[in-house]
Every structure is written in C-alpha cells, then in structure tokens.
Amino acid sequence: FNEDPFTQKRLRAGDETPVPRSLSARAQLYERVFPQYRQPVEVGVFSLDSERAFFNDSRQLRYYVDPGNKPNFNLRDGYRDRFIKRDDGVKERLDHLLRWIVANRAKLRSTHASSSPCTLGVDFVTWRGHLTKLLTTPYETQEGWLLAVSKFGGTLYVSEVETEVARVNRENRTERHEEMMYWGYKFEQYICADDANGVPDRGGVVNTNEAFCTVVQTRLAEHKLLFSGEVDCRDKDPRAPPAPACYVELKTSAEICTPKQRSNFHRYKLLKWWAQSFLPGVPRVVAGFRDHDGVVVSVETFHISKISQLIKNEYNCWKPTVCMNFCSDFLSFVKSVVKEDNPRLVYLFAWEPHRDVTYTVHRDSQYTFLPDWYIKEMAI
Ligand code: 0WD
Ligand code: CA
C-alpha cells in the first residue's frame, strides 16, 4: 500500500514534533464529556437533476406530505418499469460539493475575511456521509473504511475511497438486495410532493440521480467543518423554522415483531439514523416499517433529540458522546499527520473493525481526488 515509505522523513526534516502513527477506535476511550458541537448553519444548497447535472439552487427540494400512521404503500411498485438507477460504479468523490464551493466562494470568503485565494476559512471539507461513518466507528463491527485526505489552501479535504470488500459486495448484490435498495426511494416518492401545495405522484418514475443537498457549516471542538448532505424533504408549512430545522429525513426499516428485533433496531439502526441527522441538525426522521413483501405496515416519527433517551434501557448501548469524541479525535489525528499543503499528495486513512486507524502516504497516485479544475479555479 505505502508507495513511498520515506515520504514522512523527508516531509518532517527539521520538525521535531512526533507524528502519531495510529488512533484507537475503542469506545471506552471516548467516554468523556460531550464535545462542543456548534449548531449547524445552512450556508447554501444545490441540486442534482435526473441526469446528475449540478444546479446551484433548490430545484430538487421536495415537500413532506403526512402519510398517516397506517398507509397502504407497496414499495415494490414500479421497480421493473418505472425506475432509473444512478450508476454507482461512477465515483464522484467530492466533485459536486467542490462545484458548490467554486460557485459560492465570494459568500464563504466574505464571512471569513480570508486573505489568500484558496483559503476557505474552514479546517475540513467533506460529505456528511463520511462524517456519519466516523461517528459510528467505535461501534462498527462489520465494515471498515478508507478516507483519503489532501490539504489544499490550508483546508483538509476528506473523500471516501471504496474498500475492496465494499466493491466486491456492490458488484455481487443479489436481485433481492437490488430491489430492496429501491424500496427506500419508492417510500420517498409516496411521501414527497414537488410543490408545497402538491400531492405525491405515486405513479411517477423513481430516478435516483436526482438529489437535493444542504451545505452546512459548524464546529466540532476546535475543528471548523463545511460539509454537505442529501436532504429528502422539508416541512411544507411556510412558518416552519428555517433550514436545517425544517428538514425531514425519510427511512424504511423491517417491521419489528420480537424483543430481539427491537433491541437490534435500537443498537444498530438508531445509531446510524441518529448520527446521520444529528450532524446537519435535521431534527426528525420519519420511518416506514415494511414487511417482507415491501408493504409499509406503519409509519413512525423519531425526534433526533429524543433518540439517546429511547436507547438508554438497552444494555451496553451506544453513546452519542463516544461518537462525537471519536470523530473529534480523528480530526485532530488528521491535522497532526497531514502537514504538507499539496493537492497531489493523499494521506489514506484506513480502519478495519477491531483495529486501530492507520494511514499510508501517496504522491500522484490513483488516490488523488482534488480535480485540476478546482485547483485552477481556487488559485484565482
Ligand atoms: O462518492 C462517494 N463515496 C459518495 C458520494 C458517498 C456518499 C455520498 N456521495 C454523494 C452523492 O453525490 C450524493 O448525492 O453525496 C450525496 C449524498 O451525500 P451524504 O448525504 O453525505 O450521504 P449519506 O448520508 O451517506 O446518504 C444520504 C442519502 C442516502 O439516503 P439514506 O436514507 O439511504 O441514508 O444519499 C443517498 C441515499 O439516498 N446516497 C447516495 N447518493 C448517491 N451516491 C450515495 C452515493 N454514493 N450514498 C447515499
Ligand atoms: Ca433517506
């Protein structure tokens, strides 16, 4: 993996500060006071259309239409004949978010009074989904991750690299799994309208190229963060609080029939749901519980601020403070490792369950992810 084992020495000539080589992910190490997490502020939005083209506006934002507690949604409807699936073999890395940054630099720069051209006034730029993976790491026992980091203009850019295991799994999904991935998007279609006064179009095409994303700024301990996450829909009431507080996350999950299933739901699903929505300040998740045939049997709302109470009865359950402290310490680890400002240099941080986080260094490799157009654009 390590293409240049001497990079570190050369980089650090004359620098006496010892560089840590690894970071533990053991949950017990992170059970301390909850770190400061500033209320996330939405600094912009963007949309990706049915052909995955970028627009610096909210054209893909949809509106939440209350389905009631016991709707009759068949999530299998349209899978064969009204489904256009995004090609998930195409790796987009941070590109859409970088496009947003280029289009909104003036806005970002004026709020930070930055001096040099490529300076953004934030420490980290990434996708919300990557941060979700970091938050859940101390409790993850199944899947590892790879995160590529480059420093450019003083900002650390973090972009996921698909692991070999994830690629093999993606290329060998069963037909059943492929269909079940569609169910989540079909649920969104049953719940969302294109206009504040509209109704959902359950006979329409589900196209997973389409996306509406929020861009938020916040701070975790001493780390200033700028990240973007996909948002399913918003409260249609114009008097609803401003974004991100008006946003609603939609989920589907298998119906819960036994105490064991309830316990697993609390331990694993709610951890992921909590981490994903807590990060951008999305206050609620509306969940559709479905049976084996993809029929939604009930709908329930989960308030993110109440989830940690809900799970407290589970023995040896996850703790939000562990998630946030691990993420904060990982970001500190990245800052201490990645010192050279060079978009062609990638530090690849790797983690596998029951192991420490380690890293390798790669110059002008397959891992370089900041595009030339972005570097050129930011130099102006
Ligand atoms: O290249 C990559 N490694 C990734 C790119 C990984 C994750 C996301 N993306 C990009 C895509 O452009 C996507 O539009 O980020 C956008 C979503 O970012 P996110 O909000 O940071 O991702 P995440 O929180 O993991 O997922 C949010 C939603 C998912 O909803 P559910 O309810 O299943 O969590 O975004 C969708 C999915 O609907 N989604 C994706 N869409 C496109 N590409 C991807 C993906 N790789 N992963 C999840
Ligand atoms: Ca969702």
Image (cartoon, rainbow, N blue to C red):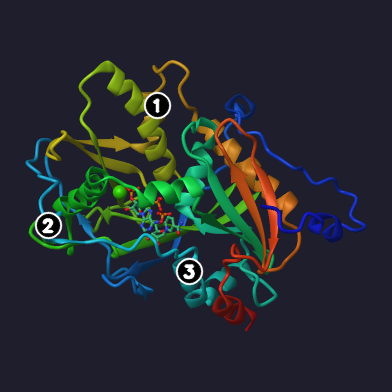
Frontmost of labels 2 and 1 is: 1
Q: Secondary structure at mark 2?
A: loop
Please state if 5 lies on the left or on the right of 311 as rendered.
right
Give the mark, 2 or 1, whose residue is nearer the N terminus: 2
The three-letter code of the residue at mark 1 reads Arg
Residue on which disc 1 sits? 267
Classify 359 as above or below 211. Answer: above
Residue on which disc 2 sits? 200
Real-space Cα distance between discs 3 and 1?
Answer: 34 Å
Classify 221 as above or below 235. Answer: above
Circle 2/circle 1 CB separation < 8 Å: no
Give the mark, 3 or 1, whose residue is nearer the N terminus: 3
Residue on which disc 3 sits? 95
Real-space Cα distance between discs 2 and 3?
Answer: 31 Å
Q: Secondary structure at mark 1?
A: helix
The three-letter code of the residue at mark 2 reads Pro
Depth check, front residue: 23 or 247 = 23
Depth check, front residue: 35 or 20 = 20
Q: Position of residue 330 (x, y in %)?
A: 63, 43
Residue occupying image coordinates x 47% and y 45%: 165
